[in-house]
Amino acid sequence: MITINSNKEAQALIKDDVLAIDDDIEIAFDGFYIDADIKCRNIYSKDSRRNIKAQNLDVYDIKARNLVVWHINAGNLDVFNINAGNLDVYNINARNLDVCNIKAWNLDVWDIKARNLDVDDINAGNLDVRDIKARNLDVLDIKAWNLDVCNIKAWNLDVHDIKAYDLNVCNIKARNIKARNIKYYGCCCAEQDINCTSIEGKHKNGKYFCLDGEITIKQLEE
């Protein structure tokens, strides 16, 4: 493991605009910033989560408080705030994934697996996720120009607002649900409104309803 104690030390390790180390990096100070790419095995923060700012990150594990990067390619993420041009992650595996804000032009994740997925806001130009698997998926707002999700599998999905093409969930609970096709197992409940082109329960006694609003099933406006 290589410990970096200052931005000056980090700058000395840069060659051809890349800080490339075939080892782990430990950040021992707050405010880590380099105008270059980082390629290493893992990035850890000493004592507490740190702030990391760089051009591109190609790292297996990232643990940080604030992550400001143009492109992130990582195996595992443990971050409070994520601000990136492109967020490209193969697997996010965590018992608890607790992120305040995820802001990215393109958010491309193959698998998100967590017991609890707790995110305040997800803002993305394109949100492309193959699988989201969690016991509890708790998100205040999901906002995206294109929300392309292959599968959302969760025991409980508790979201303030959802805009999506397809939803495939055991139980859906949200303030407002706006989607083209909704598929659920036993129950789909919205506090206000449900707007979709189709809604289907897999269980023969499955039910969908709104507490205070209306259910509108028709072709959505482009």
Image (cartoon, rainbow, N blue to C red):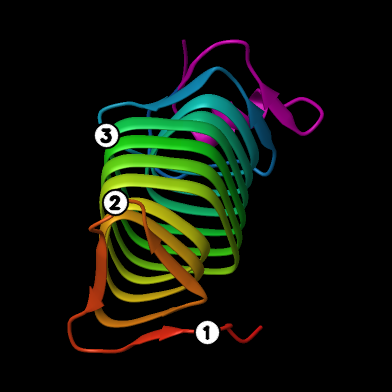
Residue located farthest toward the front when viewing the structure as drawn: 204
Q: Three-letter amino acid code at disc 3?
A: Ser
The amino acid pointed to by label 1 is Lys
Q: From what the image shows, is residue 86 above or below residue 18?
A: below
Give the labeled residue for mark 2. 203
Disc 1 or disc 2, which is closer to the eye? 2
In the image, residue 213 above or below residue 70: below
- Give the residues in magenta: 1-25
Element class at badge 3: loop
For marks 1 and 2, the one nearer the N-term is 2
Q: Is residue 40 left or right of residue 208?
A: right
Q: Is residue 21 magenta?
A: yes
* Distance in Å between CA atoms under marks 1 and 3: 50 Å
Which residue is identified by label 1? Answer: 218
Q: Amino acid at mark 2?
A: His
What is the spatial separation of the Cα atoms under label 3 and label 2, in whole angstroms?
47 Å
Mark 3 = which residue?
48
Q: Secondary structure at mark 1?
A: loop
Quadrant position of residue 113: top left
In x, y percent, where is residue 221? 62, 87
Task: Please identify, in this view, whether the residue under mark 3 or under mark 2 is nearer the observer.
Answer: 2
Which residue is rendered at x = 31% and y = 40% of the image?
134
Looking at the figure, which quarter contains the C terminus?
A: bottom right
Neighbours of disc 1 within 10 Å: few (<14), some (14-19), many (20+)? few
- Of circles 1 and 3, the one toward us is 1
User: Mark number for residue 14?
Assistant: none
The residue that appears at 57% across and 83% down in the rendered structure is 220
- Horizontal and vertical percent position of residue 71: 65, 44
